Amino acid sequence: MGMGRISVVAILAVAGIYFSMMLAKTTEPGVPRRAVVVELFTSEGCSSCPPADELLGHLRQDLAAKSIQVIPLGFHVDYWNSLGWKDRFSSAEFTQRQEQYTHALKVDGPYTPEMVVDGEVEFVGNDAGRAQSTIRQQASQLETAEVKLVPAGADQLTIQVKGPTSPNANALVMMAITEDNLATQVFSGENGGRTLHHAAVVRELREIGMLHSGGMETTIPLKLQKDWKRNDLRAVVFVQNGPSGKIEGAASVALADQLR
């Protein structure tokens, strides 16, 4: 009887060691995770937006320490512009993108600040705890589209995409140019008298094309405006199921001086 108990204990001990090793293997820093796209719909005319803008600016660096790649996109909407302050980064195109998410994610209506993670989950954009937990969850999921970005010189970028291969996939390849380290002194509206700081502000969003036979490779020119600070620019390419669907994969590259 005593020997039987010892055998059971030994078996349980071995099983415990085995599962501990497996857990360590799946959570070690070297295991690749998917890049997570975090979109923030914001406005300089919205008094509750500055904390969300600050959060967006910290997510990439804060989660990089946990081996999670965050790709932030700050979309400034234009429906606050008639309420006392015109946001110089705002665009009707970005408002339309948010409205598409409103319909797809069954939200009562567009609002700011709103965060959308990987095109699948939305919540109030200044909720830091919700943002981090959602990003960690998305980072653990399978990346079904692989995106590679290769500088091609003379302000050109080569985009290589593989997957998804589903014949019913309506996969769009999108590119955004973002700029960090931006600030605005606001003179009127809800944030009148404040200096607002922004990161990952989307300067341009364009559709590159659709995936054919599960892949794409193309070289495109980058049309950078003179007032954009090159050292603060990044190119972001992501694959999305339609204009407001799940984001299947993404990549980002700092432009700096490498594309001159």
Image (tube, rainbow, N blue to C red):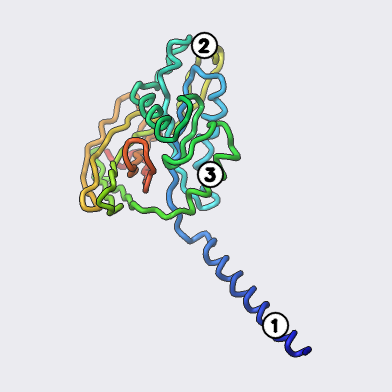
Look at 52% across and 40% down and name the residue there.
Answer: 59
First of labels 2, 3 by sequence position: 3
Look at 49% across and 54% down and name the residue there.
Answer: 140
Which amino acid type is marked by label 1?
A: Val
Which amino acid type is marked by label 3?
A: Thr
Q: Secondary structure at mark 2?
A: loop
Q: Report whether 58 appears left or right of 219.
A: right
Q: Are marks 2 and 3 in contact (CB under 8 Å)?
A: no
Which amino acid type is marked by label 2?
A: Gly
Q: Are marks 2 and 1 in contact (CB under 8 Å)?
A: no
Q: Secondary structure at mark 3?
A: helix
Q: Position of residue 95 (x, y in %)?
A: 38, 24
Q: Secondary structure at mark 1?
A: helix
Q: Could you tell me how far apart the alpha carbons at marks 1 and 3 are, in whole angstroms?
A: 40 Å
Q: Position of residue 184 (x, y in %)?
A: 47, 19
Picture disc at residue 134: 3
**Closer to the eye: label 2 or 1:** 1
Badge 2 crowding class, 10 Å Cα cut-off, few under 14, some 14 to 19, many 20 or more, is: some
First of labels 1, 3 by sequence position: 1
Provide the residue designation for mark 1: 8
Seen in the picture, residue 50 relative to 57 is either above or below; the reply is above
Provide the residue designation for mark 2: 189
Look at 77% across and 89% down and name the residue there.
Answer: 1
Look at 61% across and 69% down and name the residue there.
Answer: 20
Picture disc at residue 42: none
First of labels 2, 1 by sequence position: 1
Q: Could you tell me how far apart the alpha carbons at marks 2 and 1 are, in whole angstroms?
A: 71 Å
Q: Are marks 1 and 3 in contact (CB under 8 Å)?
A: no
